[in-house]
């Protein structure tokens, strides 16, 4: 039987919460904890897309689907060049972006969540570039000057990594459309702290063995086997600092595709 997931993508993902399932959970740390926050600012460029005051477009190369239109993602989304996108493993990371022209820019930084990739144009050639929603771009302006800042087109900015914060939210696992007991694909939602995922494992019912999942695209992971038997525990390890978290029996035995199952855990 094939042991690796194919490079498969869906045309749409639905992030409607089908139910919140509470189970026992445990959290563990993988080695000494490090902070993802960076106090240093680095140079980059930025543009904006969508409507001038818009929240950004639905979907994106990370696979978050309609989530980008609703809080807490709403008006805080952005696409990044490949150097930060990291073939999808940079999805979910959070950055502060600040413009430099004091004639129209305030001292406020826009905090954005990476939901998409911009592969060409200003994003090519190894450059660091942010393509922000209209609302996030305008947030960097002096009050009343959002339109003037957007009229500049491409601007110079500085940026730094910052922890993601989702007050009142715990990590959730969205079962992607098309999943079966032989091909299970998951999308991680609302991960505080690092925001990114470096590896994922699942454990079947009545098993002590963690099965490694394969990163397929964006923020989506999958495993081929089977038939896979729930309930499933899920362990994820962040890409940036190697923090680990395990949610026991978070996906029930009667799971269904397009459903989202929420854990009791988060990194903060």
Image (tube, rainbow, N blue to C red):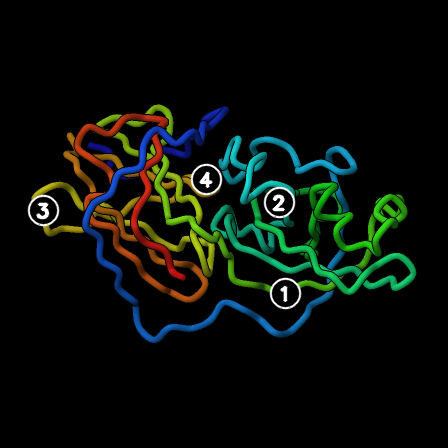
Pick the quarter of the image with the C terminus. bottom left
| Nearer-N-terminus badge (1/4) | 1
Q: Which residue is mark 2?
A: 77
Q: Closer to the observer: label 1 or label 4?
A: 1
Taking the spot 64% from the left edge, 60% from the top edge, the residue there is 96
Taking the spot 68% from the left edge, 57% from the top edge, the residue there is 128
Q: Whole-percent x and y of residue 16?
A: 43, 29
Instruction: Work out whether 127 lies above or below 122.
Output: below
The CA span between labels 1 and 4 is: 25 Å
Q: Which residue is mark 3?
A: 207
- Comparing 10 with 68, the one in front is 68
| Nearer-N-terminus badge (2/4) | 2
Marks 2,4: beta carbons within 8 A? no
Q: Which residue is mark 4?
A: 217
The CA span between labels 3 and 2 is: 39 Å
Q: Whole-percent x and y of residue 247?
A: 25, 51
How many other residues sit within 10 Å of disc 2, few (<14), some (14-19) or many (≥20)?
A: many
Q: Closer to the observer: label 2 or label 4?
A: 2
How many other residues sit within 10 Å of disc 3, few (<14), some (14-19) or many (≥20)?
A: few
* Residue 5, visible in the rendered structure: no
- Comparing 180 with 34, the one in front is 34
* Residue 254, visible in the rendered structure: yes
| Nearer-N-terminus badge (3/4) | 3
The CA span between labels 2 and 4 is: 18 Å
Taking the spot 70% from the left edge, 47% from the top edge, the residue there is 136
Instruction: Work out whether 243 lies above or below 247.
Output: below
Instruction: Work out whether 244 lies above or below 88.
Output: below
**Which structural element holds mark 3?**
loop
How many other residues sit within 10 Å of disc 1, few (<14), some (14-19) or many (≥20)?
A: some
């Amino acid at each position: 039987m094939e042991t690796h997931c194919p490079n498969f993508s869906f045309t749409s993902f639905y992030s409607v919460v089908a139910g919140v399932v509470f189970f026992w959970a445990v959290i563990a740390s993988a080695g000494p904890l490090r902070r993802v926050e960076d106090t240093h600012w680095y140079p980059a460029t930025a543009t904006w897309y969508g409507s001038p005051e818009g929240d950004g477009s639905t979907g994106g190369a990370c696979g978050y689907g309609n989530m980008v239109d609703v809080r807490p993602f709403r008006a805080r989304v952005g696409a990044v060049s490949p150097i930060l996108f990291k073939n999808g493993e940079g999805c979910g990371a959070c950055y502060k972006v600040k413009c430099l022209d004091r004639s129209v820019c305030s001292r406020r930084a826009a905090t954005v969540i990476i939901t998409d990739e911009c592969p060409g144009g200003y994003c090519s050639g190894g450059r660091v570039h942010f393509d922000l929603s209209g609302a996030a771009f305008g947030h960097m302006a002096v009050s009343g000057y959002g339109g003037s800042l957007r009229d500049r087109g491409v601007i110079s900015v500085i940026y730094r990594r910052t922890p993601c914060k989702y007050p009142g939210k715990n990590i959730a696992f969205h079962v992607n459309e098309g999943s079966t007991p032989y091909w299970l694909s998951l999308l991680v939602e609302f991960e505080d702290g690092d925001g990114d995922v470096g590896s994922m494992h699942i454990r079947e019912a009545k098993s002590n063995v963690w099965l490694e999942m394969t990163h397929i695209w964006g923020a989506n992971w999958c495993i081929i086997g089977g038939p896979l038997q729930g309930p499933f525990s899920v362990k994820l390890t962040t890409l940036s600092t190697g923090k680990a978290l395990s949610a026991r029996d978070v996906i029930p035995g009667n799971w269904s595709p397009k459903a989202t199952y929420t854990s009791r855990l988060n990194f903060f």
